[in-house]
Image (tube, helix red, strand yellow):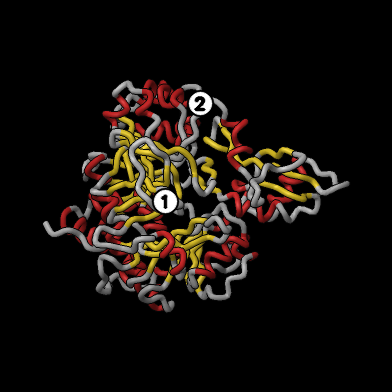
Amino acid sequence: MQQDQTLVDSLKRQLAERPDAIAYRNGERRLSYRDVEAHTNRIANALAAAGVQRDTRVALLTKQHIECILVTLAACKLGAVCMPVNWRLSAREIEYIVNNGEAPFLMADAEFLPVVEKAGMPGVKTLVCTGTAPGGVPSLADWYAGASDAFTPVVAGTHDAALQLYSSGTTGLPKGIVLSHAGLLSTSRVVSMEWKFDHRHVLGNPLPVFHVAGMTMLLLTLHTGGQTSAYAEFDPKAYLRAFAQHGITHTFVVPAMILFMLQVPDAKSHDFGTLQLMAYGGSPVSETVLQQAFEVFGCDFLQVYGLTEVSGPATFLFPADHRAGNAELLRSAGRPIGGGRLRIVDPIGLQDLPDGEVGEIWIESDRNLKEYWRNPQATAAAYPEGRNANGGWFRSGDAGYLKDGYLYINDRIKDMVLSGGENIYPAEVENVLMRHPAVADGAVIGVPDATWGEAVKACVVLRPGATAGARDIIDFMRTHLAHYKCPKSVDIVEALPRNPSGKVLKRVLREPYWKGQQRAVG
């Protein structure tokens, strides 16, 4: 069988093999592969009439998985690129991303239209809503209803851009991470093989579509001919019922979701008979939570370590590793997958380090990002040795070491905070913190949190004579920044520890909070 070259090829293959099989469901709503083809053809025609063409970015601000995958595939048929935007961001942050991508089209849920109105996005010529909206904004369905269901896709190359996701950099400005058809298809191939997921299986997907995991799970169904049961929002009680109601065989969740489900009083009484595999990743998980999960769900577990820049997964800690009874192994991030390779490199001298020594994790795989959108400097910095036939060696920014072929994450070179699966960059938060009139100096760190893995903490030095409490500082920041990025706690300190060159010693700041605890990246 010829290997798919693009996401559209995957849809064509499913149309030939199982046109009437259910591809996506949300509650009682179901779409077969034949339905997906008809809808995406109509949307592609409507997008083309609106001026969308090859390499145009198509922006989405939605929780809705089905609308997201339909627009994504329609864009691919035009050679355009889908650009899901994090709906948890502030109007100002959304404005920057949509303008940076120069997207002429934006689809948003009705609940996000007030945020859209606040944002200045002069380049957006077409605005549609996923559902019914007040104020004359057409629904997506009404917008494309009159379009033809016949469309001939443009010819696209396997290394062409297919998806653009945004991730904040250490400077605080989000970077557009451009992923290719080849990289995304590679993710689908390795996940379907290692998770043993095929056309007979049902994937429960409660992850947001602006995350690489949420998107790649939608594409897994497209590759395998299986079914996605999608959930726009995660409700632990409802999701526990969904396993039996929707026959879920596989799911991918963040550790906080596992914890929330375990905290439901009657969690053990639910039927998990169809559940074969629960994959997890995105933030640290405690051994206690993992042991409870083994007992309640009774299925195989698989840990994922990865990044948006590698189209999702870089390593897996396999079910056999979880069953080995080795506590040290459970603290590892697993082994490279799908022909990928790892190096541990001295981030200063750029020399490879031996097993057991901590350095920066470099990743080579055919899933590595194509580029950072219109940011050649960042792309070059990410690939210090350039690209090669295997994708090139990508600098992850995470620190860790190798032992017996397993990767152990030690710390974050970039000081990133991972909270509930969200990547939070302290520099971005600190830029807002320093605007507070009472703040003379400040630093942001991640501290342990039983629910979210980590929580954001601000350490603040006040101006002479100024008074400000933690609540005042947090409230101020929430008016300028997405709430999940804001500190959950604030410590007022006399001074911040610095080295002779003036750089804040964040390791010193973190040490009291992490004493006796394992700190890792998910």
Residue that badge 2 annotates: 263
What type is the residue that disc 2 sits on?
Gln
Which residue does the image show at 51% across and 42% down from the upper left?
A: 418
In the current view of this chain or complex, which residue is farthest to the left?
1
Q: Position of residue 297 (x, y in %)?
A: 36, 26
Percent across and percent down for residue 120 are: 62, 70
Q: Nearer the viewer, residue 477 or 209?
A: 477
- Relative to 148, 253 lies left or right: right
| Figure check: 179 above or below 292 | below
Q: Residue 26 bears which disc, if any? A: none
Which residue occupies 62% across, 66% down? 119
Is residue 310 shown left or right of residue 504?
A: left
Residue nearer the viewer, 435 or 31: 435
**Horizontal and vertical percent position of residue 450:** 55, 30
Q: Residues within 10 Å of mark 1 (few under 14, many from 20)?
A: some
Kindly identify the amino acid type of the residue bearing the numbered disc 1: Ser
Q: What element carries label 2?
A: loop
- How far apart marks 2 and 1 lie (CA) works out to 34 Å
* Residue 465 in picture, x, y percent from top left: 88, 46
Query: Relative to the observer, which residue lies in front, 452 or 375?
Result: 375
Q: What element carries label 1?
A: strand
Instruction: Describe residue 113's horizontal placement relative to residue 80 as left or right.
Output: right
Label 2 neighbourhood size at 10 Å, few (<14), some (14-19), many (20+)?
A: few
Where 128 sits versus 406, above or below? below
